[in-house]
Each structure stands twice: as structure tokens, then as C-alpha cells.
Image: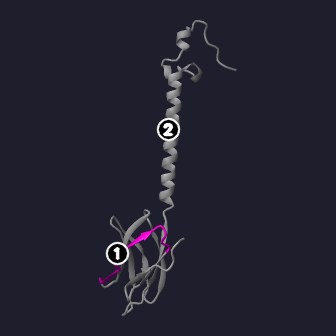
Amino acid sequence: MGTARPANVAAAELAPEREDQLPSSTQPPLLRALLRRAGTLAAALALGACATAHAKGDASMATVQLTNDLTPPSDVTVYAVTANDRQLLGDVPPGAQTAMQLPLSGPSQRVRLIAQLPSGRAVSSHSFVVTGNTTTINWDLRSNSVWFPKERP
């Protein structure tokens, strides 16, 4: 059951204080149209932001196949360097061939690979452009050669 209102409560006390608190059926038509458009715009912006966040979360990846055939044998720590970032890809023991994932932050980006030895010496690849079509990057440390064996259609 509900609570009974005293008989002496005036109708003005029951009315909303502001026009935007009116039920939608009693709001002026212009205000209803503006609120409907604002709601549509907010929904479109939310969907766009969601799609952008989803796209960033699903960034393309390329695989770096590294052959650590240095002489004398040495462990290396591999980095990918772009204009804005230096990203650790991983460690590769001597004599190993390892696959590492390189996240791509856009449709194309210029990258340089660096293999850092414990002695402080570094092997640096030439700079190259990676696109969303690049699936694999091969890098041989002894010859310091980079090539792209497979491309996406």
C-alpha cells in the first residue's frame, strides 16, 4: 500500500520545480526534440569511443624472427625503436632462433631493431617501414640483414 497524502497538500507542492523534470509527454515539443538529438549524439559518441578503444586494443602484430648467430656467442636483449618509443621485445640466448611479437601502432611505422649485448655493444638494424600487411620480419644478427619473407594479401 502507498502512503496517504494529507488533504491539505496544495497541488503546487506536487508539481515539479523545473520544466526538465516534467514527464516527456508534457514537455514542449522543441525541448523533446533537443533532448532526443542530444541522446542520439551521446550514443554515437559512445559507440565511436568504444570502436576506437577496441581498435587500439586489437593493434596489428608483426612477428620478428631473430637468429642470434653472433660470434663470439652472446645473449642479446632485443628492442624495437620507433620515433616515439623504445619497446622491449625480449631476450635471445646465443645460437637460438626466436620469434617475438612487435605491436604495430598504426597503418605504418618506421622501426629500427636493436640487439643489446651484455658487454654494452649493440647491433642495430637499418631503419625500415612496417605496414599492417607485414606479418613476419626476419633479422639475422651476424650479417645484420633484415628481410620480409611473407606479406599478407
Mark drawn on residue 41: 2
Q: Quick one: which residue is furthest to the bottom in this view?
A: 72
Residue 107 occupies quadrant: bottom left
Q: Residues within 10 Å of mark 1 (few under 14, many from 20)?
A: few
Residue at x 46%, y 78% (from the top left corner): 148
Residue 109: name its quadrant: bottom left
Q: CA distance from mark 1 to mark 2?
A: 44 Å
* Residue 74 percent coordinates (x, y): 38, 88
Indicate left or right for 16 with 87 as reference: right
At x 49% / y 28%, what residue is drawn?
A: 34
Q: Is residue 60 above or below residue 140?
A: above
> Which label number is shown at residue 150?
none
Does 69 appear above or below 46? below
State which region is magenta: 120-135
Verify whether residue 129 appears in magenta.
Answer: yes
- The image shows residue 21, relative to residue 46, as above or below, that is above
User: Which quadrant does the N terminus fall into?
Assistant: top right
Q: Is residue 144 magenta?
A: no
Find residue 81 and report its horizontal and vertical position in percent.
35, 71
> Residues at badges 1 and 2 in contact (C-beta under 8 Å)?
no
Q: Which residue is mark 1?
A: 127
What residue do we see at 54% from left, 21% from top? 29
Question: Would you call the spot at circle 2 few (<14 residues within 10 Å), some (14-19), or many (20 or more)?
Answer: few
User: As shown in the figure, which amino acid type bears the numbered disc 1?
Assistant: Ser
